[in-house]
Image (tube, rainbow, N blue to C red):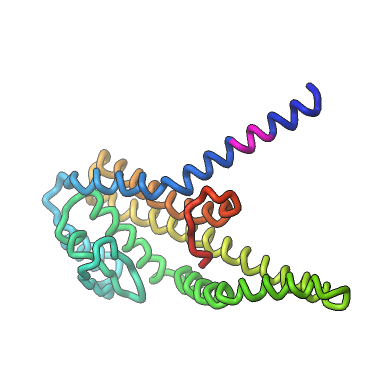
């Protein structure tokens, strides 16, 4: 096979790969939303309510140390600093979607009670936001210094290297977030095993995988920003 054909095949393979990654970056959230709407209509077979599920886990796992706060914001379910924030819609539904979302946030609570993963991520995010604010200035200054002559060229290169370091920190933060979300999902499945049947658990696992894919999509949007075909995403 001639060199030109090898190059053509490589370029085609690269283009296909980029298209595949762009599809993940641009459509993962829509896929997750469709899955949510579907599972939000399917109630669990047991008569257990979401609040009963929360209270049982809170007692068995956290010794009732976890505070449950109800909020009006739809899709605002989250965990932070010993508090579980759950929307009225999530609490009042006994759907598989609601149970899975709650279990996932309880997974984050377990992470917080068992170690410092969430605290480290929070610190890196705060640091990243501060550095990200300076990134445009750092890059612009580096480019300008490079064109000021040999006396400033080295300083320009150093500033560009600092800019690259900030970008790599952003990628690291996103990969760390993905790892933490995966761990929280694993903990969620363990919590759900005692409350959902096998078929419901299977649906919950798919739902969590689709949710995690949205974090990969966020990572890919940063990587593929140069293509111009990716949705925008915040660096930090």
Q: Position of residue 115 (x, y in %)?
A: 45, 70
Q: For the point 31% across and 49% down, which residue is it?
A: 33
Query: Residue reaching furthest right?
Result: 150
Where is residue 14, by image quadrant?
A: top right
Q: Does residue 184 appear to the left or right of 220 in the view shown? A: left
Which of the 4 quarters of the picture holds residue 76?
Answer: bottom left
Q: Residue furthest top?
A: 1
Please state the horizontal and vertical placement of residue 215, each as a whole percent of the image. 45, 55
Residue closest to the eye, 215 or 56: 215
Q: Quadrant of the N terminus?
A: top right
The x and y percentages for residue 212 are 42, 52
The span picked out in magenta is 11-15
Let me know if residue 189 is in the magenta part: no
Query: Where's residue 59, x and y in %?
Result: 23, 68
Task: Say above or below: 10 vs 26.
Answer: above
Left or right: 198 as drawn, with respect to 149 = left
Q: Residue at x 18, y 47 (%)?
A: 44
Is the magenta region chiefly helix, strand or loop?
Answer: helix
Q: Is residue 117 left or right of residue 224?
A: left
């Amino acid at each position: 096979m001639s060199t030109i054909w090898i190059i053509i095949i490589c370029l085609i393979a690269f283009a296909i790969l980029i298209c595949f990654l762009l599809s993940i970056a641009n459509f993962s959230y829509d896929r997750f939303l469709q899955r949510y709407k579907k599972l939000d209509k399917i109630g669990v077979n047991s008569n257990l309510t979401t609040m009963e599920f929360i209270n049982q886990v809170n007692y068995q796992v956290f010794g009732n140390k976890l505070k449950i706060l109800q909020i009006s914001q739809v899709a605002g379910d989250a965990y932070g600093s010993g508090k579980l924030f759950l929307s009225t819609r999530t609490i009042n539904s006994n759907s598989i979607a609601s149970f899975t979302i709650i279990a996932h946030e309880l997974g984050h609570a377990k992470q917080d009670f068992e170690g410092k993963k969430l605290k480290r991520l929070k610190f890196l995010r705060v640091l990243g936001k501060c550095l990200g604010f300076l990134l445009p200035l750092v890059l612009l200054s580096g480019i300008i210094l490079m064109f000021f002559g040999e006396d400033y060229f080295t300083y320009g290169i150093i500033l560009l290297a600092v800019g690259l370091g900030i970008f790599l920190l952003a990628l690291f933060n996103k990969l760390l977030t993905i790892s933490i979300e995966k761990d929280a999902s694993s903990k969620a499945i363990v919590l759900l095993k005692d409350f959902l049947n096998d078929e419901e658990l299977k649906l919950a696992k798919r739902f969590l995988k689709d949710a995690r894919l949205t974090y990969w999509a966020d990572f890919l949007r940063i990587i593929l920003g140069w293509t111009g075909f990716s949705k925008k995403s915040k660096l930090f």
